Image (tube, coloured by chain):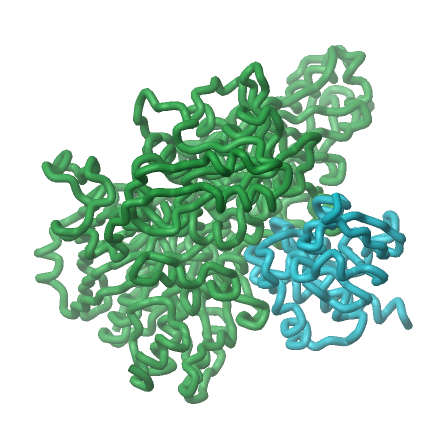
Chain colours: A cyan, B green
Amino acid sequence: MSNYVQVETTINDEPITFLCEPRQSLLEVLRETLKLTGSKEGCNNGNCGACSVLLDGRLVNSCLVLAVEVAGKSVTTIEGLAHGDHLHPLQKTFLEHAALQCGICTPGFLVAAKALLDHNPHPSEHEIRYWLSGNLCRCTGYDKIVRAVQAAAQEMEAVAR
Amino acid sequence: MIIEEKPRQQETPAKPAYKVIGTRPVRPDGVEKVIGRAKYGADIDLPGMLYGKVLRSPVAHAYIRSIDTSAAEKLPGVKAVVTSADLPRLSSNEYIDMGEGGGQLQDLHDNILASRKVLYKGHAIASVAATNPHIAEEALSLIKLDLEELPPVLDPLEAMREDAPLLDDQRYTESLAGRSSKPSNIARHAQHAIGDIEAGFAQADVIVEREYRTSMVHQGYIEPQNGTALWDADDHITVWTSTQGAFSVRAELSKLLLVPLAQIRVIPMEIGGGFGGKIAVYLEPVAALLSRKAGRPVKMTMTRAEVLEATGPTSGTYIKLKMGAKKDGRLIAAQAYMVYESGAYPSSPLGAGMSCMLGPYDIPNVLIDGYDVVVNKPRTAAYRAPGAPAAAFAAESLVDELAGKVGLDPLTFRRINASKLGTRLANGNVLPRVGNYECITAAMESEHWNAPLSAPWRGRGVASGVWYNWGGLSSLTASVNADGSVTLTEGSTDIGGSRATAAMQLAEALGIPYESIHPFVADTDNIGYNDVTGGSRTTFATGWAVYEAAQQIKRQLIERAARLWECSETDVDYTNGVLTCKTNPDLRLSFKEMAEKAHSTGGTIVGCGNPSPKQFGPAFATHIVDVEVDPETGKVQILRYTAIQDVGTAIHPSYVEGQIQGGVAQGVGWALNEVYDYDEQGRLRNASLLDYRQPTTLDLPMIDTILVEVPNPTHPYGVRGVGEVPIVPPLAAVANAIAHATGQRFLKLPLNPDAVLRGLGKIK
């Protein structure tokens, strides 16, 4: 076991310690070791965005981050978006706007969209499309995804007032 | 002056006053998908689970001289290694129907693990199971392959030549004339004919002939193929997989592994997209063989490069098409020579391409010759409206030119020639009631078509398309619970909202709230046989099964009420979820109240549906697109898109729109960027999602939809399939728009910046 490294980190606001090999990606450890399978593997080379997570609030592809890199940092995955049975506004609007069909890209889109709204609460359609262009969806043609993000932004603004 | 006749018998009946159908509820499987809890195939985790990886051919065409796995087997952590020698030898070579398409069993066998030859780069040769995926990968590098390389044949027209290298010296051309005398790469020659082609062209005032080409393209689902298997010592096999058809996987495994159907349990996990590509098995039999050897469950997932190099793309095509019209705009003759590349084994959707190509038109004289040709590329698989988009690219591009030559706008030209109820097609079929005319009319009346578009390098294109849809077999049960809720157990894997549409049709039929129905997808041990989710059949046929199950439930409710009320069953009425006694208005029970009494009035109330619909509802569509071409870079931007489609009855309009928008996006990708870019040795140069370049959010505008509802008269709720036809028109619609923007006709896809600049003469 000498080639295993102990990593102390925070995932979805919980302190967690795990063992991993230096060659393992954050995505592999999330899915196979920690059983957080909400982050999906579509390409394993940063092309599709299905494994999007937040690392200290910054949007990253977890397949391109080594697990050892998250030591001392804070990771937010799709499993951290809702609080109990209280869905994040994006999760609600994705459901209401039928913004998912097969749903495999949905966790990545939700995490990416959360990162967008966290730092730009009033994005234009173009800003939404630009921000989400690293997330591939093959089912929806993106129309309903973009509308769901617009609706969530409006809803969050209404709540904030 | 053109005098258009409105087709007779084309009146659309008034839409019934539905209560649930046509609403937009949240899907039953939605919450678990937005919180990341839904379990897809790769999410499975079992005690003692091993990880399998596949060794694939580094070359496109070779004899396998030997495979030495001894070093790999000795690597610590490796628990099993298999090659084709571990697959049972087949006793017969039958045709296996997998749902949308099929193939020879021996071909499927050789595609799973190559035996004598490798036929494409990426062809599976051997597989390893180890305690983690990294060890399995290391073990692959220890397997010694001795290959005798052969020249590959990659272009279908070259593969058809008599002196071309043969992929299989035992493959002969099948045709109506029988079997060819010499082996050939041409697996099949088919012909559709109607009328007299020579007499037809003799009457034509305008004739145009063109040659069109399209590339292989991939379904592009975001979830790679996966399969996990556990082969128990008593030869019972359990498989967890993402598939469009659990029963199809079971049948394929049974025939490949020679294990009876009842000993194989296939558990369909949530599926991350398929579009036809997740019907044929790749990993499941290999995982099963590894599990048998290792005595432990084995999970396998593909990398994206494996998905692109070794799972089914759809055919690249060559289509030479000639069409003739009279000067009043009426189409009089069409002749086509169509070549579909199958990849390594016969599997192309040639027949559907031949049938769909001219389906939107009533043409009295047609002759189509089609050829299914094997080349050193992956075995093709179904892809959304298999075969139709490339065929429509040819037909709809040419129709656009013909319309211009006879001086008609392209929609008027299409409407004059529109196929309709009673039109006999070249494949011999006669169309039932369809909405082709209505779609073209809706396009003509649309705001988009009538909006001005005037800037240099901008153009508007239209195209139509058809997909005939399918019925297939669905089987399900609906169990009434004691609190008035209903558990709906179905066997159609849900690829994009069909649990919602099944539950909605059940709610409509029973007159109860949608929310009181809990639909779920069972595995092959828990429900009767269901065909694959494909052919746009699920909301149609599973909806039909739901309707049948509801009728059984209604009969039982009426029977119970009659017993309770001591009246005749004919005196009991069930409407909108309420039982009433026609002879005594005081007697009244809601569905919920009767459900509460079920156990004490004769037992559980369960309804089943097992229909086998023979008549389907063909779906037609007409699309309008505006593009802008950048003459400096060759980039084409989609400015506006409107898809008009006859959807029969939109059960859940949001998911109907979603199917249309998704189909359009794939079609736009096919038109503009997506390509299988092989080098001369048959190595795929763009085997990643970055380089394969399917559309992103920035490549598309909002996609407007106009839902035309011409109910399918054979379905209880008028449902037609909606999922496939939206990918048929976009290729030609975009190409026609580019033609109008540039004044230049492009006959080969994709129209990426390179192709556009070449076409404009800006680069050579």
The answer to whether residue B174 is visible is: no
Residue beneath the point at 64% across and 61% down:
A49
Image coordinates for residue B491, horizontal then vertical, percent = 58, 31
Out of B504 and A74, give the one closest to the viewer: A74
The answer to whether residue B477 is visible is: yes
Asked whether, in this view, residue B292 is left or right of residue B61, the answer is right
Residue beneath the point at 74% across and 43% down:
A1
Residue beneath the point at 56% across and 55% down:
A139
Image coordinates for residue B337, horizontal then vertical, percent = 19, 55
Q: Is residue B117 above or below residue B732?
A: above
Q: In this view, does B111 lie above or below B643?
A: above
User: Which quarter of the rendered picture does the N terminus of chain B lie within?
Assistant: bottom left
Asked whether, in this view, residue B170 is left or right of residue B268, the answer is left
Image coordinates for residue B648, horizontal then vertical, percent = 50, 48
Residue beneath the point at 22% across and 42% down:
B188
**Total numbered labels:** 0
Asked whether, in this view, residue B446 is left or right of residue B351, the answer is right
User: Which quarter of the rendered picture does the C terminus of chain B lie within?
Assistant: bottom left
Quarter of the image holding residue B749? bottom left
Out of B741 and B128, give the one closest to the viewer: B128
Quarter of the image holding residue B526? top right
Out of A127 and B3, give the one closest to the viewer: A127
Image coordinates for residue B680, horizontal then vertical, percent = 29, 62
